[in-house]
Image: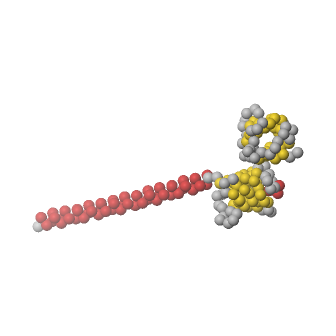
Amino acid sequence: MKKILVIALAAVLAVSAMVVVAENNAKEENQLQTLEATENNLVEEVATEEEAAQVYSLSGAVTEVGEDYFIMQDSLLGEVQVNFGEESVFEGVEADKLEVGQIVFVIYNGAMTRSLPPQVFALRVSMFVVTGEITELSEESMTIVRDEIGDEVIVSLPEDAPELAVGDHVLIYSNGVMTMSLPARMNALSVVVTE
């Protein structure tokens, strides 16, 4: 009888141990699933933050202007229709002053239609223009005296620059980058003789 009691007690202990092990395994499995879910959420959040930090841009010459849109020839994508509204920010040019031939930079949210031409909605439209008179000229660059400030700027010429001469008044489209040196230096994307 003692043997039966000892065997029964051992069996109860063994079953209890198996229940405890099964509960621990279930807890570990739940913790693992929770950790995996947390890790997946973190990965998604990081991906979303990276996407939010990504800047989508276009640059090129305006080829057509409409009431609430313009078409431009982007240097990489070709012809793109840029739509804009009240929430679009314009820098260096006003929406109603856009003209064919101007070079603009557009920032948009990354959404682009599959239409022909593709369409985007502009968050920001920027145009960087410097005007002035040519005082020195070489094959690769020119020095101008800016109209706005009266200081000298050395401008690297684009390959397709028009015929230029000292004394010409020019309008220079750039990417907005100018050195802090004296005289300042900048690269021209396009040069237009205005006088």
Q: Residue at x 84, y 39 (%)?
A: 165
Give left or right: position of 66 versus 43.
Answer: right
Q: Is residue 177 above or below residue 97?
A: above
Q: Residue at x 66, y 64 (%)?
A: 113
- Is residue 145 visible in the rendered image? The answer is no
Q: Residue at x 87, y 38 (%)?
A: 167
77, 54: nearer the viewer: 77
Q: Residue furthest right?
A: 195
For the C terminus, the image quarter is top right
- Is residue 179 visible in the rendered image? The answer is yes
The colouring scheme, among rainbow, by chain, secondary structure or one colour, is secondary structure
Instruction: State which quadrant residue 182 falls in.
Output: top right
Q: Residue at x 81, y 47 (%)?
A: 192
Report the label total: 0
Could you say where residue 78 lies in the image, as x and y percent from the top left? Answer: 69, 57
Give left or right: position of 132 versus 10.
Answer: right
For the N terminus, the image quarter is bottom left
Could you say where residue 171 lies in the image, as x and y percent from the top left? Answer: 82, 45
Could you say where residue 102 lies in the image, as x and y percent from the top left? Answer: 78, 52
Could you say where residue 189 lies in the image, as x and y percent from the top left? Answer: 74, 46
Instruction: State which quadrant residue 36 falls in.
Output: bottom left
Q: Residue furthest top?
A: 182
31, 57: nearer the viewer: 57
18, 73: nearer the viewer: 73
